[in-house]
């Protein structure tokens, strides 16, 4: 069996797993998992980030503690807890996909919370203070004044977080989730004679995906710097 | 049925947390051996990755297009591929490229740990080099230009003038990179490196005492993480960021 035989036999399996006949897998599962994970983590991360800067201590302290604990723990640890511990509590055997998704959402929302917090604290203090002195409540200040500005600056960070999420989905391998790394290993076990080539292809796949996204983030960042420069010069000239 | 048995074992485990498992006996020895190997991975990877990262950052800033190109390819190929895929490559793929004698030697030794050290070190060298590079860019370019004008060669100007100033602003991001390094040593478990996560999973499957084993691992990871975080905040408190 030559390498091109291997590729022509397994390329579809690599991309979508056994999909129409069996569960979705391969690269498609990696992408679905990363997209779902980030989309579900966004609202949670936003709430956690707001809690992190909120004026109420009873809210701020436990959330800050939670974020510190999650950020100090490897994602793999969170995955293991979810995989081995949750079935014991709920009594239901959770599948690999929901387990990995839950771990990703918990993990990502804590990282997003810090991005949101940085975005909020990065704005000039006058924005929040003048909104408050105009009589807006804290929540209204956040919703109408702070977040619309902060979220725009966060866009490049969000794309970078998506790249991290794609890389994190590879940990599904350890609990036997059929994403692209797992599928590559299965192909390697069946073919056996081309381990170097198969893992190089796996690496190249991740590379193409993440590198193009990181270029996109870079472009977004440059565009937003240019825009704010233009806005600033417009302010000066008028 | 197996799932049912497991969940019973788990609810038993929850009703009684067996601290004795962690205080003595063979399982305690396994967990501590794992912790020791994790700390070794952290230390070795850090000690090698940091100077390597500085060298790569210098190559990335070099005036020669060719050198710069190699550095860019290395950095991007490390950063855009998950550590797990790197580990799989270094464990399954790379040994095949070696001559037979080297392969024999490798398999006679602890190939899991060697592959893990190589993968983690290269991966973090790339990340650290980007931190160092942004530190170098924070140093005003006149510093470098003045050093060159005084007749220092490119390398000495970097080593004696720019890097000492750059590394100072690089310490906080380097520390947070070290924190990531510590957490990512856990991923080495995929190739069977007998570090903390691997041992915790092994104790779990031998005893069904998942709560105890995972609590030990979590507390260990958290403790070291918090130490690194404390070091970072201590540093930025002692040497607050200042304009260069």
Image (tube, coloured by chain):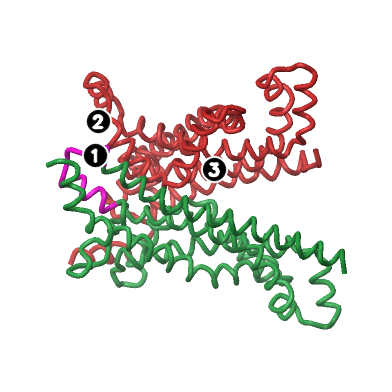
Q: Main secondary structure of the magenta part?
A: helix
Query: CA–CA distance between discs 3 and 2?
Result: 36 Å
Q: Which mark is residue B224?
A: 3
- Residue A190 on the magenta span: yes
Q: Which mark is residue B96?
A: 2
Whether residues under marks 2 and 1 lie with C-beta atoms below 8 angstroms apart, the answer is: yes
Tell me if residue B15 can be seen: no
The region drawn magenta spans: A182-197
User: Which residue appears at 33% of the width and 49% of the height?
Assistant: B201
Q: Dot 3: what SS? A: helix
User: Which residue appears at 22% of the width and 22% of the height?
Assistant: B104
Where is residue A184 shown, x and y percent of the image? 26, 49
From the image, tell me which residue sits under label 1.
A195
A1 in relation to A80, above or below: above
User: Which residue appears at 66% of the width and 37% of the height?
Assistant: B171
A124 in relation to B140, above or below: below
Location of residue B32 by image quarter:
top left
Left or right: B121 as drawn, with respect to B242: left
Q: Earlier in the sequence, mark 3 or mark 2?
A: 2
């Amino acid at each position: 069996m030559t390498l091109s035989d291997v590729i022509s036999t397994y390329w579809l399996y690599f991309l979508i797993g056994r999909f129409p006949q069996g569960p979705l897998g391969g690269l498609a599962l990696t992408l679905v998992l990363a997209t779902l994970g980030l989309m579900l983590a966004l609202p949670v991360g936003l709430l956690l980030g707001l809690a992190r800067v909120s004026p109420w201590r009873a809210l701020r302290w436990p959330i800050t503690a939670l974020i510190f604990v999650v950020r100090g723990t490897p994602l793999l640890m969170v995955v293991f807890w979810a995989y081995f511990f949750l079935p014991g509590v709920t009594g239901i055997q959770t599948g690999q996909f929901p387990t990995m998704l839950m771990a990703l959402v918990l993990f990502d929302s804590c990282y997003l919370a810090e991005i949101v917090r940085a975005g909020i604290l990065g704005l000039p203090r006058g924005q929040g203070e003048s909104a408050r002195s105009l009589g807006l409540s804290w929540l209204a200040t956040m919703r109408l004044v702070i977040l619309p500005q902060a979220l725009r600056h966060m866009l490049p960070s969000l794309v970078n977080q998506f790249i991290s999420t794609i890389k994190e989905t590879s940990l599904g391998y350890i609990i036997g989730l059929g994403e692209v790394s797992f599928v590559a290993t299965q192909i390697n076990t069946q073919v056996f004679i081309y381990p170097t080539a198969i893992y190089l292809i796996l690496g190249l796949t991740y590379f193409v995906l993440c590198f193009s996204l990181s270029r996109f983030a870079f472009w977004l960042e440059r565009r937003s710097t240019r825009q704010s420069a233009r806005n600033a010069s417009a302010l000066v000239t008028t | 049925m197996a799932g049912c048995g497991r969940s019973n074992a788990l609810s038993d485990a929850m009703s009684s947390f067996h601290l004795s498992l962690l205080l003595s006996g063979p399982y305690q020895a396994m967990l501590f051996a794992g912790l020791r190997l994790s700390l070794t991975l952290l230390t070795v990877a850090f000690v090698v990755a940091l100077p390597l990262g500085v060298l790569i950052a210098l190559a990335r800033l070099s005036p020669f297009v060719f050198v710069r190109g190699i550095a860019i390819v290395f950095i991007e190929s490390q950063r855009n591929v998950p550590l797990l895929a790197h580990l799989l490559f270094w464990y399954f793929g790379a040994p095949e490229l070696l001559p037979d004698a080297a392969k024999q030697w490798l398999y006679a030794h602890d190939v899991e740990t060697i592959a893990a050290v190589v993968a983690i070190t290269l991966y973090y060298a790339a990340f650290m080099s980007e931190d160092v590079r942004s530190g170098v860019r924070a140093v005003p370019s006149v510093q470098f230009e003045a050093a060159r004008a005084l007749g220092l060669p490119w390398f000495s100007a970097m080593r004696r003038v720019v890097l000492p100033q750059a590394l100072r602003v690089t310490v906080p991001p380097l520390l947070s990179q070290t924190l990531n390094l510590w957490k990512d040593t856990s991923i080495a478990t995929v190739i069977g490196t007998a570090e903390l996560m691997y041992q915790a999973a092994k104790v779990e499957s031998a005893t069904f005492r998942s709560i105890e084993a995972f609590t030990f691992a979590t507390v260990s990871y958290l403790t070291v993480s918090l130490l690194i975080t404390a070091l970072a905040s201590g540093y930025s408190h002692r040497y607050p960021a200042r304009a260069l």
